[in-house]
Image (spheres, rainbow, N blue to C red):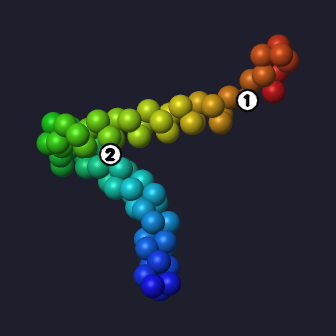
Amino acid sequence: MKEDRSYKQELSASDADFIRVLEDLIDVLISNGTIRMTDLPPEALKKLHARKQTRQRLRNTSLDLINDDDDGLL
């Protein structure tokens, strides 16, 4: 059904944003001592770590404003 597809697309579109909210929530809970990293299942830790690494690599590439060809000038 077309309506079912529309609902599924809407849910899929919001998944990435919701995942980021959950990651931030986990970070806050760990930071304030409510939970510990060791409280999370190993597979969850692997996924969180992989996502953080990917975001860091993206941040590093998108914020690399120094062009080596210009003697380090912006």
Distance (Cα) linking label 2 and label 1: 28 Å
Q: Quadrant of the N terminus?
A: bottom left
Residue linked to disc 2: 27
Instruction: Say which mark, if any, is on residue 36.
Output: none
Q: Relative to 18, does residue 61 appear above or below in the rendering? A: above
Q: Residue furthest top?
A: 71
Report x, y in % for residue 61.
63, 31
- Give the image location of residue 24, x and y in percent: 37, 51
Residue 20: x %, y % from top left: 42, 54
Picture residue at 59% right of the left edge, 30% below the top: 60
Q: Nearer the viewer, residue 37 or 12?
A: 12
Q: Circle 1 sits in a helix, a strand or a loop, which is it?
A: loop
Which residue is the extreme one toward the left? 39
Where 23 falls versus 74 (above or below)? below
Q: Position of residue 4 (x, y in %)?
A: 43, 82
Question: Which callout, 2 or 1, points at the residue further toward the start of the chain?
Answer: 2
The answer to which of 53 and 29 lies nearer the viewer is 53
Residue 42 falls in which quadrant of the image?
A: top left
Q: Residue at 33% across / 41% down in the picture?
A: 48
Does residue 53 appear left or right of residue 31 in this picture?
right
Q: Residue furthest right?
A: 70
- The residue drawn where x is 85% and y is 18% is 70
Mark 1, residue position: 65
Dot 1 crowding, Cα within 10 Å, few <14, some 14–19, many 20+: few
* Secondary structure type for disc 2: helix
Callout 2, which amino acid? Asp
Q: Quadrant of the C terminus?
A: top right
Residue at 82% across, 21% down:
73
Relative to 17, 41 lies left or right:
left
